[in-house]
Image: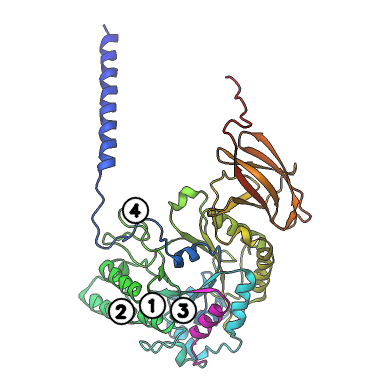
C-alpha cells in the first residue's frame, strides 16, 4: 500500500528533472546576448602583426616615476605605509606641500639611455612608463596644464628621450596614463550634482586632449596602459570613453589598449556584461598570476609585478619580503606557460638614478635570459599537464617543448606526459645542446627524462623535440583489470 505511491512519485520526479534539465539546456543554448552599445567590439584575440609581437614579448619592464619619488614614502620623519606614489592621499602629507614638489623636481642623474640599457640587459622586450600618475604631474610638457615637467627646475621633456632611447634599444614603449587626476579641479570621484556634472565635462575634454597630445607627440609608442579608472565618475562615462577609444585607434592604427580603460553601459569593467574582454588584453593580473590556463579564458594578458610586496614608485624603505631573481624568473616562466607576459616594476629615485638592488636583479635575470630566452620569447601554453619540476612552454608551429626546471627531483628523472600519438625524438639541455639526455617511456605517452645539469643553483631548461608516433598502438600498455 505504501510502496506503489512512492515508486510513482519517484518516476514522476525523475521525469520532471529530465524535462527541466532539457529545457534548461535548450534555454542556455538559445539565450541571446545582452545588446550593448559600449561593450566589447571584438571577440577573440587580435591577429595583426603588432599584437602578435606584443604577445610574444614574454618579459617587460614597468617604470613608475614622478614627484612621489622625491619624498620616497616619507614626510616629516614619518613613514607612509602605503604605496609611495599614493603619499599625496595620506593625511600626514599636506596637499599644498605635495603639489609644490614640482619646484624640487630636478633629476640631475636621469639618463634615458642608461634606463634602456638596464631593460635590454634584463631581456625586456617592452616597457610601460608613467606619463602621468594620479597626482596629475606630467612628465611631458603638456599644453593643457601647468602641472608639468616644463615648469619644474628640470624644464625639459622626460618622455621624448625615454621613448627614443627604448626604441633605439629595440624595446617597444607603452605609455601609462592615469585617468584619475588629483590636481585637476574638474576631477570627481562620483557625479552627484549638476555642479559635479559641469566640472566633470571639463575634465573629460581635458583628458581627451591630453591623450591625443601624447599619441601625436610620441608616434613611436605602441600602446596605452590605463590606471585610475575604477571610480564611479569614470565608470559612468561609457559612451564618451568608447568614442574616445575609437578616436585614438583611428589616429593610431594598431594601438594596443588594455582592459582597464572603460566600462560598458552597465558599469562592467575589464569584461562587459556578456563576459567578453574589453580591450586587447586583460589587465586584471596585478601582483598575482593565474594558476591554470582556464583562468585566462583564452585572452591575451600580462602580469605587472613589484619587487617588494606593494611598492611601485620609489620608496626609501623596502619592507617585507624582497623577491629574488630566481623567484622573478619563475614568475616569468609561469606567465609565459599560461600564454601571458611578465612585467617587472622599477621605481627610480627622485634624482633619476635607479637603486642598486633593482640593477642587480635586472642583471641576474638578464644573465639567465641570455642562455634561456628561447624558452620565453615567442612562447606560450604547451598543452602539457603541470608537473612538480616547473613549467613548460612551446613555440607556435614548432615541434619543440621547453621544460623550465625550478624543482629538481632527487631521482634526477623528470616526468613528462605528452599528447596522444606524440613521442620524444630528442632531448637535451638548452644551455648545452650537445648533451643529449636519456629518455624512457614509462607509460603510454608518459616519459622520464633524465638530466643532471652541471649547475643546479639556477633554473635551467630541458628541450624536447617531439614527433608523431609511427603507429597509434606503439608502446600501448594494458591496463590492470579491476
- At label 2, counting other C-alpha atoms closer than 10 Å, the crowd grade (few under 14, some 14-19, many 20 or more) is many
| Closer to the eye: label 3 or 1 | 3
Point out the stretch of residues depicted in magenta. 154-173
Q: CA distance from mark 2 to mark 1?
A: 9 Å
**Taking 99 as reference, is 472 above or below it?**
above
Q: CA distance from mark 4 to mark 1?
A: 29 Å
Q: Which residue is mark 4?
A: 275
Which numbered disc flags the more N-terminal residue, 4 or 1?
1
Residue 192: x, y in percent?
24, 70
User: Do the residues bearing badges 2 and 3 touch, measured as CB atoms within 8 Å?
Assistant: no
Which numbered disc flags the more N-terminal residue, 4 or 2?
2
Q: Residue at x 57, y 63 (%)?
A: 309
Q: Secondary structure at mark 2?
A: helix
The extreme left residue here reads 194
Q: Which residue is mark 2?
A: 203
Q: Which residue is mark 1?
A: 181
Residue 300: x, y in percent?
45, 58
Amino acid at each position: 500500500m505504501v510502496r506503489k505511491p512512492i515508486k510513482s512519485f519517484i518516476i514522476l520526479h525523475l521525469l520532471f528533472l529530465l524535462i527541466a534539465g532539457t529545457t534548461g539546456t535548450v534555454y542556455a543554448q538559445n539565450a541571446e546576448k545582452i545588446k550593448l552599445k559600449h561593450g566589447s567590439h571584438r571577440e577573440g584575440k587580435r591577429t595583426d602583426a603588432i599584437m602578435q609581437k606584443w604577445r610574444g614579448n614574454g618579459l617587460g619592464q614597468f617604470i613608475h616615476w614622478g614627484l612621489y619619488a622625491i619624498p620616497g614614502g616619507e614626510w616629516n620623519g614619518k613613514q607612509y605605509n602605503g604605496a609611495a606614489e599614493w603619499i599625496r592621499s595620506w593625511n600626514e602629507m599636506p596637499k599644498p606641500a605635495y603639489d609644490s614638489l614640482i619646484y624640487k623636481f630636478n633629476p640631475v642623474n636621469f639618463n634615458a639611455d642608461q634606463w634602456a640599457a638596464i631593460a635590454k640587459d634584463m631581456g625586456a622586450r617592452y616597457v610601460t612608463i608613467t606619463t602621468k600618475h594620479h597626482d596629475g604631474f606630467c612628465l611631458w610638457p603638456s599644453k593643457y596644464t601647468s602641472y608639468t615637467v616644463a615648469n619644474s627646475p628640470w624644464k625639459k621633456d622626460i618622455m621624448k628621450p625615454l621613448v627614443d632611447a627604448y626604441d633605439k634599444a629595440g624595446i617597444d614603449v607603452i605609455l601609462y596614463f592615469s585617468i584619475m587626476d588629483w590636481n585637476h579641479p574638474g576631477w570627481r570621484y562620483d557625479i552627484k550634482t549638476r555642479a559635479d556634472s559641469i566640472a566633470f565635462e571639463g575634465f573629460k575634454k581635458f583628458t581627451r586632449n591630453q591623450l591625443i597630445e601624447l599619441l601625436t607627440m610620441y608616434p613611436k609608442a605602441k600602446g596605452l596602459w590605463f590606471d585610475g579608472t575604477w571610480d564611479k565618475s569614470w565608470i559612468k562615462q561609457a559612451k564618451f570613453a568608447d568614442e574616445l577609444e575609437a578616436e585614438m585607434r583611428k589616429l593610431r592604427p594598431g594601438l594596443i589598449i588594455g582592459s582597464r580603460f572603460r566600462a560598458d553601459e552597465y558599469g562592467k569593467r575589464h569584461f562587459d556584461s556578456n563576459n567578453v574582454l574589453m580591450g586587447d588584453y586583460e589587465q586584471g593580473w596585478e601582483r598575482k598570476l593565474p594558476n591554470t590556463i582556464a583562468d585566462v579564458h583564452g585572452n591575451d594578458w600580462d602580469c605587472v609585478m613589484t619587487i617588494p610586496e606593494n611598492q611601485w614608485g620609489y620608496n626609501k624603505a623596502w619592507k617585507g619580503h624582497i623577491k629574488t631573481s630566481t623567484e622573478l624568473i619563475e614568475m616569468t616562466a609561469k606567465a609565459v606557460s599560461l600564454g601571458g607576459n611578465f612585467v617587472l616594476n622599477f621605481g627610480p629615485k627622485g634624482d633619476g638614478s635607479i637603486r642598486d638592488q633593482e640593477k642587480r636583479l635586472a642583471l641576474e635575470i638578464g644573465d639567465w635570459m641570455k642562455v634561456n630566452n628561447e624558452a620565453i620569447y615567442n612562447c606560450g601554453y604547451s598543452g602539457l599537464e603541470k608537473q612538480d619540476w616547473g613549467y613548460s612552454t612551446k613555440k607556435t608551429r614548432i615541434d619543440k617543448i621547453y621544460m623550465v626546471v625550478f624543482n629538481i627531483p632527487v631521482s634526477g628523472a623528470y616526468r613528462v606526459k605528452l599528447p596522444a600519438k606524440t613521442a620524444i625524438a630528442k632531448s637535451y639541455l638548452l644551455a648545452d645542446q650537445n648533451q643529449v639526455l636519456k629518455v624512457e617511456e614509462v607509460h603510454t605517452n608518459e616519459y622520464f627524462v633524465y638530466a643532471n645539469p652541471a649547475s643546479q643553483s639556477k633554473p635551467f631548461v630541458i628541450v624536447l623535440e617531439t614527433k608523431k608516433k609511427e603507429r597509434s598502438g606503439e608502446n600501448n600498455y594494458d591496463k590492470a583489470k579491476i
